[in-house]
Structures are given as C-alpha cells and as structure tokens.
Amino acid sequence: MDNLTKTQAQARADQVRAFRAEQRLLSEQGLLQLPDDTAAAIHRYHDELLHELQQAQDVDLSEGARHLSLGMQIVSFLGAAALAASLFFLFYQYWGYFATAMQVAILIAAPLVSLAVACWVRRFDASGYYAKLAALVSFASWVLNIVMLGSIFNLTPSPNAFAVFALYGFLLAYLLQVRLLLAAALMCSFIFIGAKFGTWMGSYWIYVGENPEHFFLPALFFFALPLWINQARFHGFAAIYQMLSVVIFFIALLVLANWAGSSYLPWSPSVIEGCYQVAGFVASALLVLYGLRTRAVNLMLAGNVFFALFLYTKFFDWWWDWLPKYLFFLVIGLTAILALMVFNRLRKAQQSPLQKVPQPGGEI
C-alpha cells in the first residue's frame, strides 16, 4: 500500500465502507444472501486491507475520524502560528543582549534545527501533523532569518527575499508534503515575479499590485505546471497550483476590467476595460468547460463564481444608476434562475445513463 497516495488510499477505504454499507442494506432487505464462509472471507479481507491502509497512509476509517482529522489540521496550523509568534517575540525580547556574531549564528541555526526536527519527527509520525507543524515553524524561522539578517547588516529591501522565501517553501512542501507551505511558496513566487516585472518597467518593486498585468504569465505558468510535471505523489498539490493560479489570474482580470488606469495598453480606458471584460467572460466560461471535462469540481466552481462576478459588475455598470433598485435586483434574481437552468442542463448532460439490466430470456 506504500505506492498509493493518501488520496488514493482514502478513496479505497471509502469504497470499502460504502460496499459494506450497501451489502448490509441488501442483506436486511433479503436481496443478497452470501454463504457464511464467503461473507467471513470478504470481511476478513476488508479488515486486513483497511488496517494496511491505515498503517501506511493514516486514512480515516469513519466519518468521526474524518471530522477529527480536519480539526487536527486546524489545530496544527494554529499551533504552528503560535510557535512562530513565540519565536519571533523571543528573538525581539532578548535580541539586544547578544553580540552580532551570536545573532547571526542563532538566525542561521534556527531554520536548520527546526528542519532537522521536522525530518526526524516525520520518521515516527504516521499522521504527519507534528512534522507539518515543525515545517511551518521552520519556514517562519527562515523568513525571520532573512528579515533579521537584512536588518543587522542594513541591506536594502529587495524582492529577491521573496524568491528565497519561495525556494525554501517549495523545499519544505515537497519534502514533508505540506500543502499550506506550497501555497505560501506560490504566493511568494507571485510577489517576486510581479515585483521584478515592475522594476523592469521602471516602477519601485514595493508597488507590486499596481499593475495586475504582471501576474498573467506566472498564473498561466503555475496553472499548467501540474500538467507538465505529474503531482500524483503529492496529495492536493495539483489543485493548489491550479486554484491559486486561477484566483490570481481572474482577480487581475477583474481589476483591469473595471480600472483601466493600471494597464500598459495604449488605448482609451473604455476600450481597455471592454477588452478585459470580454476576456474575463471568455476565460471563465473556458474554465467551466475545462473543469467539466477534467472533472475538476473546484475549477468548475471557480469558473462559475468569476463568470457571475464579471456578469454582475456589468449589470451594475449598465443599470444601477437608472433602474429602480427593486427592478435591478429582480434582473439579478432572474439571471441567477437562468444560470441555474443552464447548469442543470449541463449537469444532466454529464450524468451517465442508467444501464439497462438484462432480463430473463435474453431481452433487455
């Protein structure tokens, strides 16, 4: 079972649980009566399978366990944040008592020691929660390391720090399979690339959000990255790459569709906004179709949300000033009903038809 990812192992365990529930229901209704030895053999096989899955991937074998796992993820994040804050304030509390050489040594040692602790804990922690907590602390130590070293040696602030943050975040994310650190590394990468584009265009790097067009290419790159490099061994990584890229891409589109002053295009503001509005509608519709085709529910939902946002912002521009408010919201409600009808048609089109069961005598 070691060759299965946690997602695959959890899906297999859920399949076994569903089979047992359906078998129990059919037995109670008298539709399925297995011989005792066959039923015992199947039950024993499933028990062994679930035990192996639980030992190898720490899967949840009940709904209660799944809810507790979610709670453990939240608690581990809060614990990591609290430990990182404790480390931060500990440094500032006693920082002035250390010589410069000692300060540098502490800053270098903190992320390395926490990384070693995370790797050591990972060997004994089947659930991975404690190792992920240590990894988050290590990342916070790394960020504190870079910031404090820059302060000690009076270095000029630079967007290159975000590249260093991103590299360490990617290292920890893939070494210990921490999705939160992957998201943090991606955000640092977006900030670094956007800031670099800004400096190349002549602006100060700290105004990274003033030109949303800087984020289009990195968003497309990170969205396509899981298609080029298989992420199946890493639970949830592909979804994080694509969802975060989609959010960044469409927020940039939405900003440009309503405020053309931040665009580099040499056209009038109305033309720029119109072009980006059309691009937003087309891109969100394509994302919905892509999500339907690849069965990526999150991407399909994101496409629906951003299509609705572009549509409602256009409604606001067109009708808010001259339509009565009750009529404006009536139009919004009728549009929502129309969208529900369209999505219902798409949903039915995606449903596989029920296969007809052969009846006695060979007829269907």
Image (cartoon, grey):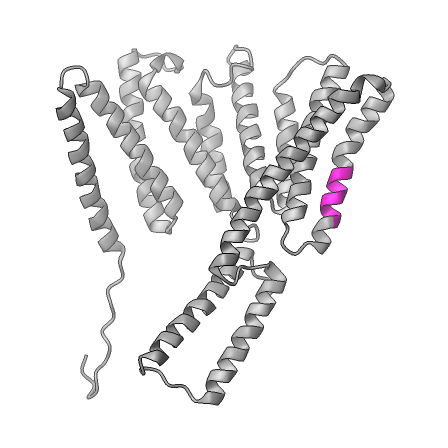
Residue 289 in the image: state x and y as whole percent: 31, 44
Magenta-highlighted residues = 113-120
Q: Can residue 230 be seen in this view?
A: no
Tell me the quarter of the picture where residue 268 sits.
top left
Could you tell me which quadrant the N terminus lies in?
bottom right
Up/down of 173 relative to 255, above or below: below
| Residue drawn 77% across the image and 32% down it | 110
The percent position of residue 256, horizontal first and vertical second, equals 36, 20
Q: Residue at x 51, y 83 (%)?
A: 41
Magenta span includes 277: no
Q: Which of 334 and 88 is in front in this view?
A: 88
Q: Residue at x 73, y 47 (%)?
A: 119
Q: Main secondary structure of the magenta part?
A: helix
For the question of whether residue 129 can be seen, the reply is yes
Image: 69 above or below 48 = above
Q: Is residue 353 left or right of residue 147?
A: left
Q: Residue at x 34, y 77 (%)?
A: 26
Q: Is residue 7 above or below residue 207?
A: below
Instruction: Find residue 287 and report its horizontal and vertical position in percent.
Output: 34, 40
